Amino acid sequence: MNNSDQHLGLVKEGKFMLLTPESYKGKVVSVTEDSMVVGRQIQEIDLGEYEGTAIMIEGEYRGDWIYAAHIIDQAGPILTALVQKAYNK
């Protein structure tokens, strides 16, 4: 993946479950606004308000984290249901 990409996923138990790209489908990652190079402990974004919904995050995927992340869109109930059906989640 490129340094900064858009990532579609679902929020489950406060974590972000990737749906795209297909090779990462189902992988659960943490999300932070911090870059990979910080002089302090990384602060995870609280995704609680998005629980159970599909969201789109832009950021840099590296291993178990998406860095320099910001949430660019949140699906409503109907679109979340369609995303879940489309990705069998």
Image: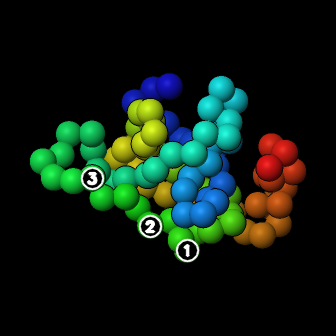
SS of the residue under disc 1: helix
Which amino acid is tagged 2?
A: Asp
Label 3 vs label 1: CA separation?
20 Å
Label 2 vs label 1: CA separation?
8 Å
Horizontal arrangement in the rendering, residue 69 relative to residue 22 (left or right): left
Which amino acid is tagged 1?
A: Glu
**For the view shown, which residue lies furthest in the front direction?**
13
**N-terminal of the two: label 3 or label 1?**
3
Q: Which mark is residue 37?
A: none
Sort mark 3 into few (<14), some (14-19) or many (20+) by Cα contacts within 10 Å: some
Q: Position of residue 8 (x, y in %)?
A: 63, 46
Q: Which residue is mark 1?
A: 49
The image quarter in which residue 67 lies:
top left
Q: Which residue is mark 3?
A: 42
Q: Which residue is mark 2?
A: 46
SS of the residue under disc 3: loop
**For the view shown, which residue lies furthest in the bottom direction?**
49
Q: Mark 2 and mark 1 in contact? Answer it, CB < 8 Å.
A: yes
Q: Position of residue 43 (x, y in %)?
A: 30, 58
**For the view shown, which residue lies furthest in the left direction?**
39
Q: Position of residue 39 (x, y in %)?
A: 12, 48
Which amino acid is tagged 3?
A: Ile
Horizontal arrangement in the rendering, residue 41 relative to residue 11 (left or right): left
Sort mark 1 into few (<14), some (14-19) or many (20+) by Cα contacts within 10 Å: few
Count of marks placed on residues: 3
Label 3 vs label 2: CA separation?
12 Å
Q: Is residue 30 something that shows in the picture?
A: yes
The image quarter in which residue 81 lies:
bottom right
Q: Residue at x 27, y 44 (%)?
A: 35
